[in-house]
Amino acid sequence: MLKSTDIIYSDENYVIINKPAGLLVHPSYLDKHESQSAMKQTRDLLGKWVYPVHRLDRPTSGVLVFGLSSEAAAALVKEFTERKVKKQYVALVRGYTEDKGSINHPLKELWDKMTDRSSSRDKPAQEAVTDYITLERIELPFAVRPHPTSRYSLVSAAPQTGRQRQIRRHFKSIFHPIIGDAKHGDGHHNRMLQEKYGLNRLMLHSNRISFNDPFSNKLITAEASWPEDFSSLLARMGFAMQSKMLTEM
């Protein structure tokens, strides 16, 4: 359940929370048995209705913005559409990534047989760009075929576009899938890390968002601290996790 300490910013138009991994953003008929969502829990904490502005995958933790009115939500959605909102994530990926890079790999819309029955499956891929820098690399003495050891990188990623599961799909496309990703990841590494270190989540966290308030033009920057399950796994694996890792890209 969300706690008041999970609210990291609020004003008359917006509230920003640190969403736990595993929590839906809003109710979905795709999971009719799930009664809880970040939208519902934020509404209950504030005692007022909130309106979703952007997506955050269920297994991803971190920064999530809601509007406190439909007008405020629509105004910020426009900022997202015009690519005026800066987002930053931290992710644990397989292998040694380059010191820095830009993944420019068009992505097709993900088609779902339940929600997209009337839409075309033949839409062309859309532009998708993710910039990243490598924060730290480690090597573990555990063999995962075909290699005698296991290598991992901690990266900071900044998506320049907002495609569905963009960061997860992009790192898979450069052969550095995100650890703990059941859909786009490496099952061999996931299983090893689960057995050795207790991996139990997608290792992707949205740690910062920055945008100009559409009404006042005031710059709003919010940072979401790393969840305990995220940071403790990194520590057990041997990452140093210096404070400089959260430096803005």
Image (cartoon, rainbow, N blue to C red):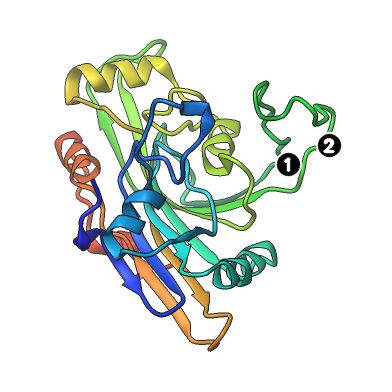
Q: CA distance from mark 2 to mark 1?
A: 9 Å
Q: Is residue 72 above or below residue 171?
A: below
Q: Which residue is mark 2?
A: 124
Q: Position of residue 134 (x, y in %)?
A: 41, 50
Q: Nearer the viewer, residue 141 or 183?
A: 183
Residue 53 figure quarter: bottom right
Q: Nearer the viewer, residue 147 or 132?
A: 132
Give the residue type that dot 1 points to: Pro
Figure quadrant of the N terminus: top left
- Image height check: is 98 above or below 182? below
Q: Residue 106 has which mark?
A: 1
| Residue type at numbered disc 2 | Pro
Residue 208 place in picture, x, y as percent: 40, 63
Give me the disc on residue 199.
Answer: none
Q: Circle 2 sits in a helix, a strand or a loop, which is it?
A: loop
What residue appears at the point 56 percent right and 68 percent down from the top-left corner? Answer: 85
Residue 193, image quadrant = top left
Q: Is disc 1 surrounded by few (<14), some (14 to 19) or many (20+) residues within 10 Å?
A: some
